[in-house]
Amino acid sequence: MREARDSISLATISALGLTQIIGYGTLYYSFSILAPGMAKDLGITLEQVFGVFSISLFVGGLSAPAIGKQMDRIGAATVLTVGSVFGTLTLALCAWSPSVAVFALAIVLLEISSGMVQYQAAFAALVEIEPKTASRIITYLTLIGGFASTIFWPISAALMGYLSWREIYLVFAALNLLVCMPLHFWMMRKGRAAKADGAIRERERVIGAIPPEGRRGAMIVVSAAFALLGFTLASILAHMVPMLGNLGLGGAAVVIGSLFGPAQVLSRLINMVFGTRLSPPVLAVIAAALMVIGILILGLSGSWLPGAVAFAICLGLGSGINSIAQGSLPLYLFGSDGYGAITGKMAAARLAMGAAAPFVFAMAMSQFGIGLSLFATAALGTVGTAAFVSVAMTTKRSLVAAG
């Protein structure tokens, strides 16, 4: 029985890993590569394109709590399946868009579909399957998903040499429809079949480390910390390759940017080996600190190639662990009951804060230069790091008191 469950888990993790690579690669990471072509084709400035992207992130944040509630109500696999179809349609709408208004609407809808198919929904699906081991399984999933930027930044850049951004989005729509949707549908059917056969055993609930009376305050602090780090990371990722090019790194910018993905994978491999020794709050602190350090290195080193490489690696290491923390920390602090709704609220705060990041960072670079913009972003990340430190200390006190 145990071997059967393990094989099913491996199949589920593999399926979700592939869909996360495609989901993040087509709906998020490719945007910064395709944005200049979008601006030229639509007759608007690059800042305006990122302004539309920022609005879409904000709307996506507003939709996250509702999506989270639907995961608890109808199941995360069902939301993933619907999201794949929705993502396909919105990519096609974006590719067809005959005007800036239709383009803006399509990008907004694209971000809503992202919330239905990316980590928030995938983590909820894993918690539904096995609450007690979900934190470990989330690490495996993010290990696979970490290849999204490594695969899709170079693919998007290469395709720009042969196809227009509209044609590329049609290719991406086909990937979501022909690969992601069937895999999500398979997960949904498998879950429903198991329920119908009575094969699903009663899962053990996870009880949160924070007592009920302290959860409201902890929820606010954790949400704020993830929001600040989300702003920091979104600022950099949305402009990473073009920014490195503008610093004078030329053709090496894409190669350096591609180090971000392997660094994410490396951090998750390290976490698989040593992560059991560290609590999710401590992992969140480490993730935030690594991202801040990476940004500071780039701000100080400028066009120096080793500094840029160190920046990409540190940012990737921090982002990799941060993705794990986004799934494991809420489970650790607040338990498995209502996990979808809890992570939906956190995603709302993170996306709402990060909504302005691409536009604000683009404006900051044009007005104050890349260096000063990087230091300001690092300062925000430092505040988020301090918030995670406070959560780690509070949790430790609560566990000591309970013990």
Image (cartoon, rainbow, N blue to C red):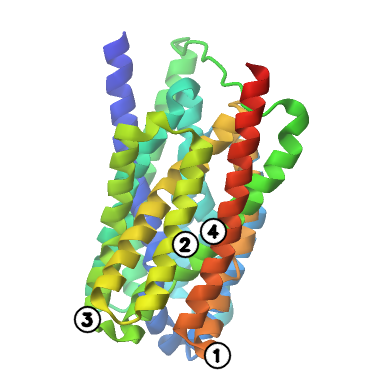
Residue 292 bears which disc, if any?
A: 2
Q: Nearer the viewer, residue 344 or 262?
A: 262
**First-in-chain label (4 vs 2):** 4
State the residue position of label 3. Answer: 251
Q: Residues within 10 Å of mark 2 (few under 14, many from 20)?
A: many
Looking at the picture, how far across and down is residue 40, in whole percent? Answer: 41, 89
- Badge nearest the viewer, 2 or 3: 2
- Badge nearest the viewer, 4 or 2: 2
State the residue position of label 1. Answer: 367
- Under circle 2, the secondary element is helix
**First-in-chain label (1 vs 2):** 2
Residue 230 bears which disc, if any?
A: 4
- Under circle 4, the secondary element is helix
- Under circle 1, the secondary element is helix
Kindly identify the amino acid type of the residue bearing the numbered disc 2: Val
Q: CA distance from mark 2 to mark 3?
A: 25 Å
**First-in-chain label (1 vs 4):** 4
Q: CA distance from mark 4 to mark 2?
A: 12 Å
Identify which residue is drawn at 42% across, 62% down: 293
Q: Residues within 10 Å of mark 1 (few under 14, many from 20)?
A: few
The answer to whether the residues at label 3 and label 1 have Cβ atoms under 8 Å apart is: no
